[in-house]
Every structure is written in C-alpha cells, then in structure tokens.
Amino acid sequence: MIGNNIKTLRLEAGLSQDELALQVGISQPSLNKIEKNETKNPRKLSAIAKFFSVTEEFLRFNNLEIKNNRVFNFDLLDIQASAGTGVALLDESVVQSISIDKDKFQELFKCAPTDSMKIINIKGDSMTPTFKDNDFILVDIANITLSDGVFVFRVNDELYVKRLQRLPNKVVALSDNSNYIPFDLPENTEIVARVVCAWQFNSL
C-alpha cells in the first residue's frame, strides 16, 4: 500500500525515481524497493510525506493507486543486448521504472501493455537504421516462440539482438545494417524475448 501510494504521487508529479530519491535523500534502488512494497517500514517515509505535503498516515492508509490506473510502468533491466558482435550477459536487475499512459501506448503500438514487457539497452550498430547504438528497446519476455521477427537471444552466455528468418532447415540471424554478414543460429541458442519496438518509437 505505502509503495503504491508513493509511486502514484511520484507519477502524478512527473518525477522519475532518480529525481524523487535525490529530493528525499535516498538511493534510487532503495526507492525502487519501497515502491515495490519490499520495504515494510521505510526509514525516509516522513521525508517523502513532507515532500508531497501529506502525512505519513495518508501514505500508509489511503489507496491512491486506483486514481492512476491509466499509467503503465515498465521495468528497465540492467542488461545489455548487442546489435553487433555480442556482449556478455549482465545482472538482470531492475534499475528504474519508466511510465507511459496506457492510451498513448495503445495508440503508438496497436497493442495493450503487459507485465511481460520490459525495456533493455542495446549496444552496436548492426540493426541500424531500425535502431541505433544505445537505443532502448521494448521487449516481450513471454513471446519467445521462434518465428520471423526481431529477437533478443543468448548464445554461449552472450546476448544478441537480430532479425531472425526461418528457412526449411535452419534459422538465419540477419542484420539490418548491410555491413554485417548473416549467420546461422547455433543449436544451443536460447530465445530471450521478442523485440516489440525501439523505445524511440522507430518501427520494426
């Protein structure tokens, strides 16, 4: 309850987790735990209440979440997927929550947001011009059925993001940048997620 109320007030104020954490004197990971209700008795609750001009009791006992049901929150994961030659898997922890209005999301992507959609950062230029080095991409970790499309996949503990094409006897990984050579997907490939779009709203 407390975490939901703090998140609702933060979103209504148009603040990121980093910005609110700085204002009340805690770290962003600590605020993230509070908003996920993993911290039952936040030590900075009084500072948070003061910042929003409410009481601690207001944060503890009111249910503000219903007022903010038009906003959907996406987890930004602390991993890097390569759009080039491959990069080692990093810690898959949530480092930030990014919010978007549900109606705006529906308008942009022609689908409803789900809890299995996450945001990750990519490195490399092999998928240019679809998306660029350091772009953030929206992926669906529940959509791992192999088909034609853009996927994040793991080979020997390295992550890649490529356009996959199914052929009669193999699957080929293609780059949108013509400077990169296609390659056959190894048998030990693990599909991690399907790429929905670049967060900058470039189309696939």
Image (spheres, rainbow, N blue to C red):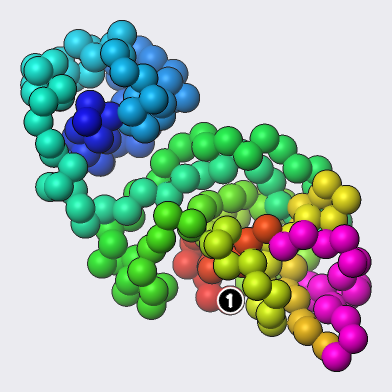
Query: What residue is drawn where x is 80% and y is 43%?
Result: 88
Is residue 179 visible in the rendered structure shown here?
Answer: no
| Location of residue 4 in the rendering, given as x and y in whole percent from the top left corner | 25, 35
Query: What residue is drawn where x is 53% and y is 52%?
Result: 119
Using residue 82 as the reference point, say whether residue 169 is left or right of it.
Answer: right
Element carrying mark 1: loop
* 187 is higher (above) or lower (below) than 80: below
Using residue 179 as the reference point, say whether residue 30 is left or right of it.
Answer: left
Using residue 169 as the reference point, say whether residue 64 is left or right of it.
Answer: left
Q: Which residue is mark 1?
A: 204
Front residue of 177/90: it is 90
Front residue of 169/195: it is 169
Front residue of 178/32: it is 32
For the N terminus, the quadrant is top left
Using residue 161 as the reference point, say whether residue 186 is left or right of it.
Answer: right
* 105 is higher (above) or lower (below) than 155: below
* 69 is higher (above) or lower (below) than 126: above
Q: Quadrant of residue 35?
A: top left
Q: What is the count of numbered marks?
A: 1
Residues in magenta, as a range = 168-191
Main SS of the magenta segment?
loop
Query: What residue is drawn where x is 83% and y is 62%?
Result: 189
Query: What residue is drawn where x is 83% and y is 78%?
Result: 171
Q: Residues within 10 Å of mark 1 (few under 14, many from 20)?
A: few
| Location of residue 149 in the rendering, given as x and y in whole percent from the top left corner | 66, 77
The verdict on residue 180 being magenta is yes
Identity of the amino acid at label 1?
Leu
